Image: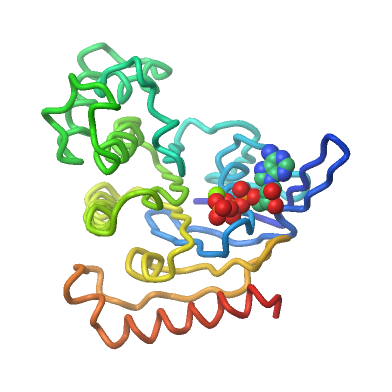
Amino acid sequence: MLDVHGLGKVYEGSGRRTEAVRDLTFSVAAGELVCLVGPSGCGKTTLLKCVGGLLAPTAGEVRLAGRTVDGPPPGMAFVFQEYGRSLLPWMRVGQNVELPLKQKRLSRERRRALVADALESVGLADAAGAYPWQLSGGMQQRVAIARALAYEPEVLLMDEPFAAVDAQTRAELEDLVRRLWRERGITILFVTHDIDEAVYLGERVLVLSASPTVVQQQLKVDLPVERDQLHTRVDPRFAELRTRVYEQVQAAKLGR
Ligand SMILES: Nc1ncnc2c1ncn2[C@@H]1O[C@H](COP(=O)(O)OP(=O)(O)OP(=O)(O)O)[C@@H](O)[C@H]1O
Ligand SMILES: [Mg+2]
């Protein structure tokens, strides 16, 4: 579904040159949920922006279903790191969720139905008429997820979407992502700096090195598909996997 080949990104401007991503190659199969984990500043956001066609790579390429990505492709949706800045404060929740749908040629009824269904899926059916700033942080992030879902993407890119919410909300949102992934068969690329989160969510974890970034290691998460916060996190296999990823992340930080 998604092929990233030899991807590199160098930022240049105002006399500064930053090589954020050096040489990334990996692929994601249709319907897979892959987590990317790497230290802060290693180029995770840069990578996702290149994958989503929001930023042009300086080397290599990204292919979606065999076609080179050179701008935001129609079948892709993004959930950003900073939800506070991604929702429009002057629009109601329902309007925020509906906004990207206006690019698609859909009837008004169809748009309304998609918005209602997406808000229902994230447990916010009754918040459509509220403004984003009237909601808690976790609720705002659910709105951002609903907006991505309503768009009916084939591929969903999520950039540390839960970094700014409290631990309990985060656990709920993680379960929400697993549930939506299973129900809707979306291909998900989920970026996080949290090792436990990567292992809990992913079917596969890619460990990124420190900037300039390469893929340090890949790990298959052979935990049952059915996961829950109570049992999965105390599963000995979970502990083993998180230790393996932790070691890799440490090695990546030291540049080994
Ligand atoms: N627009 C930009 N112009 C110049 N340099 C940039 C730009 N965006 C990012 N960088 C640099 O590229 C590197 C990677 O940044 P990026 O935001 O991709 O990292 P990240 O892994 O997402 O970090 P975090 O975990 O803090 O979100 C950093 O050194 C950063 O300073
Ligand atoms: Mg980032």
Outermost residue toward the left in this view: 126
Q: How many marks?
A: 0
Task: Return the residue nearer the eye: 203 or 107.
Answer: 203
Q: Is residue 226 left or right of residue 210?
A: left
- Displayed quadrant of residue 146: top left
- Displayed quadrant of residue 72: top right
Residue at 41%, 79% (x, y): give it.
242
Outermost residue toward the top in this view: 108
Residue 82 at x, y percent in the picture: 45, 40
Residue at 62%, 73% (x, y): give it.
216
- Displayed quadrant of residue 203: bottom left
Q: Is residue 84 left or right of residue 73?
A: left
Compared to residue 89, the image places residue 65 above or below, namely below
Decide if residue 44 is in sight here. no
Q: Is residue 125 left or right of residue 86?
A: left
Say how the picture is coloured: rainbow
Residue 62 at x, y percent in the picture: 63, 47
Compared to residue 81, the image places residue 196 above or below, namely below
Residue at 44%, 31% (x, y): give it.
85
Residue 58 at x, y percent in the picture: 77, 44
Task: Return the residue nearer the eye: 74 or 142.
Answer: 142
For the C terminus, which image quadrant?
Answer: bottom right
Residue at 66%, 66% (x, y): give it.
210
Compared to residue 13, the image places residue 207 above or below, namely below
Decide if residue 254 is in sight here. yes
